[in-house]
Image (cartoon, rainbow, N blue to C red):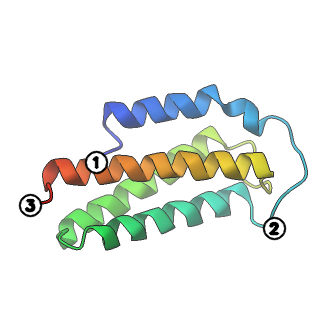
């Protein structure tokens, strides 16, 4: 659906090109770790996708959830050195933007399969 597509590959490349955001520690803007923050934001995005597309079958919803787990695993792999650190403001803003782009990929994939009538 998403994780095997060209758009996802480009987003991972975008992430790797912006790893400098995560290289310099700074003052944390929250108590959550980057891992917790990322996991929560991806979960929020998945819930929003499912709510915005009530026509999705249970099978399609499970596929979205499985793929979102893959996204979190990929992010954990790329950000492993800082996964358990609290994010800075800049890092949380980057993660918000990145996860919004991931959500857009899911929305686009759903529209491609089941366009609005």
Please say if 90 is above or below 10.
Answer: below
Q: Position of residue 100 (x, y in %)?
A: 49, 52
Label 2 or label 3, whichever comes before in sequence order: 2
Pointer 3: what residue?
117
Rate crowding at label 1 as few (under 14), some (14 to 19) or many (20 or more) other CA atoms within 10 Å: some
The label nearer to you, 3 versus 1, is: 3
Pointer 2: what residue?
31
Q: Please report the residue visible at 80 percent of the width from the left and 64 percent of the height from the top.
A: 30
Label 3 or label 1, whichever comes before in sequence order: 1
Q: Please report the residue visible at 57 percent of the width from the left and 47 percent of the height from the top.
A: 97
- 106 or 9: nearer the eye? 106
Q: Secondary structure under badge 2?
A: loop
Q: CA distance from mark 2 to mark 3?
A: 44 Å
- 60 or 81: nearer the eye? 60
Q: Are marks 1 and 2 in contact (CB under 8 Å)?
A: no
Q: Secondary structure under badge 3?
A: loop
Q: Which mark is residue 108?
A: 1
The label nearer to you, 1 versus 2, is: 1
Q: Position of residue 96 (x, y in %)?
A: 60, 53
**64 relative position to 77: left or right:** left
Q: Which mark is residue 81?
A: none
């Amino acid at each position: 659906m998403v994780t095997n597509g060209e758009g996802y590959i480009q987003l991972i490349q975008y992430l790797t090109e912006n790893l400098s955001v995560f290289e310099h520690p700074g003052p944390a803007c929250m108590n959550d770790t980057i891992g917790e923050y990322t996991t929560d934001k991806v979960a929020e995005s998945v819930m929003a996708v499912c709510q915005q597309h009530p026509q999705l079958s249970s099978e399609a919803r499970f596929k979205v959830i499985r793929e979102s787990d893959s996204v979190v695993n990929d992010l954990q792999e790329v950000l492993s050195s800082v996964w358990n650190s609290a994010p800075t403001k800049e890092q949380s803003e980057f993660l918000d933007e990145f996860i919004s782009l991931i959500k857009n990929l899911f929305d686009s994939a759903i529209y491609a399969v089941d366009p609005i009538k």
